[in-house]
Image (spheres, rainbow, N blue to C red):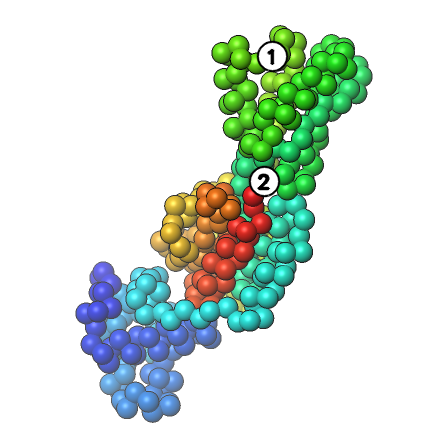
Amino acid sequence: MAASPITELTTRAREIFQRVVEGYLESGQPVGSKTLAGDGTLNLSPASIRSVLADLEGLGLLAAPHTSAGRMPTDSGLRIFVDGMMRMAEPTADERARIEAGLAETGAVEQALTKASTLLSDLSGAAGMVMVPTLEQRLAQFSLVNLGQGRALAVLVGEDGGVENRVVELGEVVPPSLLEQASNYITARLSGRTLADAAQIMRTEIASEKSELDAASRDLVERGLAVWSEDADERPVLIVRGASNLLDDDALNDLERVRSLLDDLENKQSVAQLLDSARDADSTRIFIGSENRLFGLSGSSVIASPYRDREGRVVGVLGVIGPTRLNYARVVPMVDLTARSLGKLIA
């Protein structure tokens, strides 16, 4: 049966439902009527509570995993709780300091991305994930260095201080003057742009004959910029840290689910596609259990948030993955804070 909107529940059913969900998220165990009646705040007998629990189960909001009277929320129940009842807990001063200080001490953007994934893993107790922005490196300097025997070393220095090297096969001996001319052209005319923008501008200028390069230098320019796109599909697009956090005591009781989850994480391209679906979100998105095909069998949830550069453009997505009993109220603001902090470091 389809889950009923939480607004259609009675006050008593709503309170019991909330108690069950919060108890499950805290302990990871089904919550029974005796536990709910134990503190006396509901002012209901265990029999009355069991009746409400049965109604909530009939609505598809709760499920009984075993023959005991304990109930746990279904994926639909968690969705209703997260969207309509959850009270967010702002990151503590210590958590905020660890995130901001941890990212501030990094150098190149690649280091910050790895650090962000590690911080999310450490603070959430789940696995942290960061999708690396593709082709967002901005040029500061470009050089072609003669290696002899028809080869040159293309050296790219990004505005963030990162340095990348690639060997360019020229096929013939090229005079140093041509290498210098091509290097100066790229650095002087295209610095401050992304590689994708640089390549597009280069081709437009050459096609319209606005460039001051001769045919040999034009060929070098194209070779120099193109070499970075040749291995783009093979580059890792996802950084995952803390997968071992998924192997807690409760997980070891369900090894098949854990094995399925770890297999899913190995398929980084599919995980990146899931994260990419959160790029256009105004805020943090939550994917619960069977709501997403990729992690449906492993019963896992993903909390993801886009991160932006200083101009407000989305350049990637980060988040955490863990069991559906994640502490959403605590982790969601943490992911959001990490995304905003990381964005401040990206030019």
Q: CA distance from mark 2 to mark 1?
A: 37 Å
Q: Nearer the viewer, residue 242 or 139?
A: 139
Check the picture and name the quadrant holding the C terminus.
Answer: top right
What residue is at 56 percent from the left and 68 percent from the top?
95
What residue is at 61 percent from the left and 32 percent from the top?
139
To which residue does mark 1 refer? 212
Estimate the x, y position of residue 322 in percent, counting from the top left. Answer: 49, 60
Q: In terms of secondary structure, where does tag 2 sit?
A: loop
User: Considering only vertical position in the picture, is 240 above or below 159?
Assistant: below
Check the picture and name the quadrant holding the N terminus.
Answer: bottom left
Locate residue 102: give its quadrant. Answer: bottom right
Q: In terms of secondary structure, where does tag 1 sit?
A: loop
Estimate the x, y position of residue 185 in percent, counting from the top left. Answer: 64, 20
Specify few, some or many for label 2: CA neighbours under 10 Å numbering under 14, 14-19, or 20 or more.
few
To which residue does mark 2 refer? 236
User: Considering only vertical position in the picture, is 36 above or below 213?
Assistant: below
Estimate the x, y position of residue 153 in percent, counting from the top left. Answer: 73, 24
User: Considering only vertical position in the picture, is 10 above or below 112?
Assistant: below
Locate residue 230: give its quadrant. Answer: top right
Q: Count all numbered tags in the image, as a single digit.
A: 2
Farthest top residue in view: 215
What residue is at 33 percent from the left and 75 percent from the top?
18
Residue 123 visible within the image: yes
Q: Nearer the viewer, residue 180 or 39?
A: 180
Residue 245 visible within the image: no
Name the kind of residue labelled 2 in the image.
Pro
Estimate the x, y position of residue 133 in percent, counting from the top left. Answer: 53, 41
User: Considering only vertical position in the picture, is 146 above or below 45?
Assistant: above
Using residue 228 as the reference point, say whether residue 204 is left or right of it.
left
In primary-sequence order, the first of circles 2 and 1 is 1
Mark 2 or 1, closer to the camera: 1
Using residue 90 as the reference point, say whether residue 227 is left or right of it.
right
